[in-house]
Amino acid sequence: MNITVDESKCCGAGQCVLVAPDVFDQRDEDGIVVLLDATPEPGLHAAVRDAATICPAAAIQVHE
Amino acid sequence: MSAAGPRIAVIGASAAGLAAAEGLRRLGWDGVITVVGDEPHPPYDRPPLSKQVLSGAWPPERTALRDAGRLAGLGLDLRLGTRAVAYDPARREVTLDDGERTVLECAGVVAATGVRPRTLPGTEGVEGVHVLRTLQDALALRRRLAEPGRRLAVVGSGVLGAEAAAVARGLGHEVALIGAQDTPMERVLGREVGALLAGVHRDHGVTLYPGRTVTGIAVDGGRARGVRLADGAFVEADDVLVAIGSEPAVDWLRGPAAPDLSDGLGCDRYCAAAPGLYGAGDVARWYHVGLGRHIRIEHRMNAGEQGLAAARNLLAELDGERFGQRSPFEPVPYFWSDQYDLKLHAYGILAGAVRTEVLRLGGDPLRLAALYGDADRVTGVLGIGLTPRQARSLRPLAAAPGTWQEALARLRETVAA
């Protein structure tokens, strides 16, 4: 799995951090997504896929 | 049935429909997935329409929810520019409005047809009268706002009207915001926060017409020239945006054996409206077990979450051995709004609150957290101008509603951290 995020689409909802805190964080200044781990271990894949589906700005792309 | 196996039809190709289709594939459905969308565009995102698209910051292509490659990878039978016109719940057949009136035999159906905007009577075909739901709508209004010095009257001071007013004002146009509510977004945010928001719009130069009823749009030679108010006032305008709410798009589900369609598609805790029929997104009114009542949510976050939940539960109904048990859909509702440089985050249910407690943070009146609820317990929480960590930490307050005393104590802790 390889993850990319589109910072310019991110709306700062923070849902990805709630679903997969080991993979995503937010910048303190504006809440924009920070990708902590672009190639997470398999145990995190399901949570990452959920985060990508529910991201309300469609800013997370998962490549598998 | 075709050689490719049984079919699930997803009616609606926006956020909820796409989430359902993706969920079905991801969870292992290897039959046909037909996605029917009445607009000509592949799935795109709506929140940017009243923000980045209207302001011109984004070209329309940027609203695409998935690029062509990823969409193709899902192997969907995607039928765009096509509308479902009938559903037979006993036979699980969907009829389309394509030339042949194709009838789709389905193993299951996800209804994700969303809502359509309410309009003012007698304004159809009048030039300069706009609604804002589709990409086409947004681009039509954008074309007008791309020229300098317009006068825009926004009818409706809910979230859509307030956001559009902020964008138009940001572009330098003359903007009037006319609302039946006494303050913008008051039905959701309450009077105190609404008054604060009114101040922000006023400070940015928007002319507010609060607590007013619109009696009609004045038309001259087929073109709007202003808005008439019940108190006799007349608001001159080159363009009028009508943002007075919407109606669930359920006409295709009507019929003698139709499920409950009293306010959207009535669904149970699993998002099921009938055997094999599930609802998701703006159109679905379902029983939220945690809240103990039916709710229907017209917010972007819910579209994705409910699309996924509907897919999961439909598969579980069709083949429990393979896909597991159905589970109740019990999200913590979330929405956000951008107006000028303000960002609002809200969790839970704010609308209809009988009690509100607003906690201001520091000296800046535009940094606050607020609790909403009934007499006994807190059901929703709002943050404006908070850090991301603070905003996220509001969520547990809405996820497990407590008494006012507990919630206030926790809120103070949260925002002090």
Image (cartoon, coloured by chain):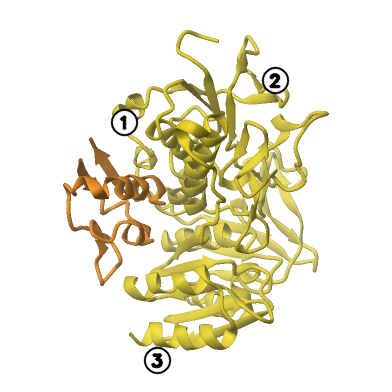
Chain colours: A orange, B yellow
Residue B180 in picture, x, y percent from top left: 71, 66
User: According to the image, label 2 marks what residue?
Assistant: B91
Question: Alpha-carbon distance for marks 1 and 3?
Answer: 48 Å
| In this picture, residue B179 sits left or right of residue B415 | right
Q: Are marks 1 and 3 on the same chain?
A: yes
Q: Looking at the picture, which amino acid does disc 2 mark? A: Arg
Q: Residue at x 59, y 82 (%)?
A: B403
Q: Where does the image place residue B10, in percent across and percent down from the top left?
A: 54, 30
Pointer 2 and pointer 1 on the same chain? yes
B136 lies left or right of B388 = right
Inspect the image, locate mark 1, and give the three-letter code of the amino acid beneath it: Arg
Residue B130 showing in the rendered view: no
Specify the quadrant of the image occupied by residue B353. Answer: bottom right
Crowd class of label 2 (few under 14; some 14 to 19; many from 20; radius 10 Å): few
Residue bearing mark 3:
B363
Residue drawn 72% across the image and 51% down it: B217
